[in-house]
Amino acid sequence: LKDLKPGHVFGLRGPLGHFYFDPATQPHIVLLGAGVGITPLMGMLRYATHLKLANKVTFIDVNKTEEDTIYREELEQVHAKSNPNAEIILSYTRLAPEHPWKGERGRLGWDMITKYVPDPMTKHYFICGPDQMNKDLKILLLEKGVPKELVKLENMGF
């Protein structure tokens, strides 16, 4: 773009695909992530926070340790404090038992989802994390009865 001259005409497309948040039709979204899978989910959370949307956002992010959590400070200091409609849940899978963490521990499963998501069959789910986690969560949600059209996956190929 830096080499374009005034008057040059070009076209743009996108965003494309199905992994997007529509505030008009999705009153409560559930963002399920792990590792770098947090990246596309953060866009949705930032959008809701920046525009002060009334939509409920339940954000569950799982990592090995606190240090592995990408955007941790932003999640805790910005969204958890300035977006009253966002619930931020962080879970860790490799903390020592004596670690002082008071939040969730362990992998993401149905028990954790239903603990934070009331009426889970009607929510819109966005999943992004390691491929196996994505597959496992999609199967889990569908087996529990969540309609297929409410479950969206973003595969980042890791």
Image (spheres, rainbow, N blue to C red):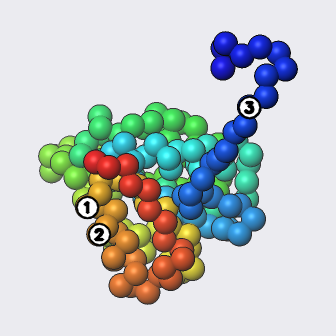
Query: In front of the other: label 1 or label 3?
Result: 3
Query: In front of the other: label 3 or label 2?
Result: 3
For mark 1, what is the residue?
A: 132
User: In this rendering, does residue 66 appear at all?
Assistant: yes
The label number, if any, that marks residue 48 in the structure image: none
Number of other residues with Cα within 10 Å of mark 1, as a class: few under 14, some 14 to 19, many 20 or more: few
Answer left or right for 20 relative to 125: right
Locate residue 26, reporting x and y percent: 66, 68
Compute the Cα span from label 3 to label 2.
Answer: 42 Å
Q: Identify residue type, mark 2.
A: Asp
Answer left or right for 140 relative to 32: left
Q: Nearer the viewer, residue 51 or 138?
A: 138
Quick check: 75 above or below 22? above
Residue at x 50% of width, y 47% of height: 40
The label number, if any, that marks residue 10 in the structure image: 3
Q: Nearer the viewer, residue 64 or 20?
A: 20
> Toward which corner of the image does residue 111 lie, by quadrant?
bottom left
Compute the Cα span from label 1 to label 2.
Answer: 6 Å
Q: Are marks 1 and 2 in contact (CB under 8 Å)?
A: yes
Which quadrant of the figure contains the N terminus?
top right
